Image (spheres, rainbow, N blue to C red):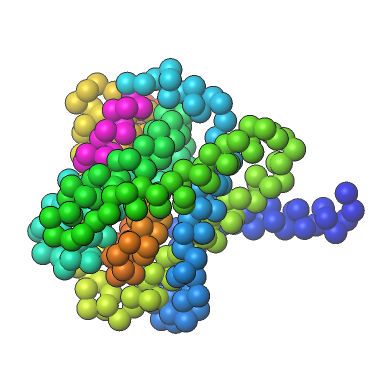
Amino acid sequence: MDRGAIQLKKTLWKLTKFSEDYFALLVILGSIIGFFNPSIFGWAIPHISLFLGIIMFGMGMTLNKDDFKTVLERPIDVVFGSILQFSLMPLLAFLVITIFHLPTELALGFILLGSCPGGTASNVITYLAKGDVALSVAITTFSTLLAPMITPILVLWFAGAWIDVSAYSMFLSIVKIVLIPVILGVIINNSLGKKIDSIRQVLPLLSVVAIVLIVGAIIGVNSEKIVSSGVIVLLAVIIHNALGLLLGYIGTKLIGMDEKKSRAVTIEVGVQNSGLAVALATIHFSPLAAVPGAIFSVWHNITGPILANYWSKKDKKESFV
């Protein structure tokens, strides 16, 4: 390998490390830039599905046979976490839109957000929180594979009474932008292994760039409407996320899960695949319906690391007792 290629590899590695360490700040910065200068990210709106596909492909590239074995070896834990995810979050979304009397488009955004599977960031946050990472990955994988069936049904159930929802069209969208990229990533990862280490290392950087573009574009195109309703939506997102984390943790303790498992499931429940919510809202409804997902993308990347830091420090204190 020549010197130029080595230097390029080092630069990409540094950029990837930077993007992972400052992911939440980059998303916030993208949101601010998009809000004050919508034209910068405006071009990304028609390509949101493509960007989400890149993110899900990256997720697939991190999965191996052992991750699927975990689903089979620990079915009760994985199924419980997925059930909690797909029941608690849509119910809380419905509660939030009822309390705040949100208009139809924003209400749809919350229902979509609550009906989506866990987000890929949950695995990293679980690791930082000293939780059960294997369980976190297994639940993310399982809930993502279930999403093409479960998410459209939940949206139809909670929102079908007041707006026309095509569950079949939504099913096809999730298959195209989530399931197919994930499966392709899994196949390539398990077929080529170490041969594609250099590609695998740069995928987190591409995923971060894709998320920043998605959030910045949605915030930008709705900047004027966010001025009038942004505080209410932000408050609703905060409550939705906080209750998801709190009730998720309580739920795990009620069935007697140990602390590591509880942390993994709690984070899985509270961290949604907001990128999927944004993509589905943009495709099937309107950019305004994507606002809750975009704001949630920013918010859960703040609360998740804060919670992980709290648990990590708690463990250190207890180890000295």
The total of numbered circles placed on residues is 0
User: Foreground: 170 or 228?
Assistant: 170
Q: Position of residue 159 (x, y in %)?
A: 18, 54
Give the main secondary structure of the magenta stretch. Answer: helix
Residue 29: tell me if it is visible: no
Q: Position of residue 7 (x, y in %)?
A: 80, 57
- Which residue is at a point 63% across and 32% down the rendered structure image? 190
Q: Residue furthest top?
A: 73
Q: Position of residue 225 (x, y in %)?
A: 27, 77
In magenta segment, residue 221? no
Q: Quadrant of residue 154?
A: top left
Residue 6: tell me if it is visible: yes
Q: Quadrant of residue 101?
A: bottom left
In magenta segment, residue 81? yes
Q: Quadrant of the C terminus?
A: top left
Position of 186 with respect to 255 (left or right) is right
- Which residue is at a point 59% across and 55% down the rendered structure image? 205
Against 213, is 241 above or below?
Answer: above
Q: Residue furthest right?
A: 2
Against 39, is 288 above or below?
Answer: above
- Which residue is at a point 54% across and 53% down the rendered structure image? 54
User: Foreground: 206 or 17?
Assistant: 206
- Which residue is at a point 13% across and 52% down the rendered structure image? 95
User: Foreground: 242 or 181?
Assistant: 181
Q: Position of residue 177 (x, y in %)?
A: 46, 51
Against 305, is 255 above or below?
Answer: above
Against 32, is 192 above or below?
Answer: above
User: Foreground: 147 or 204?
Assistant: 147
Position of 101 with respect to 203 (left or right) is left
Magenta region = 77-88
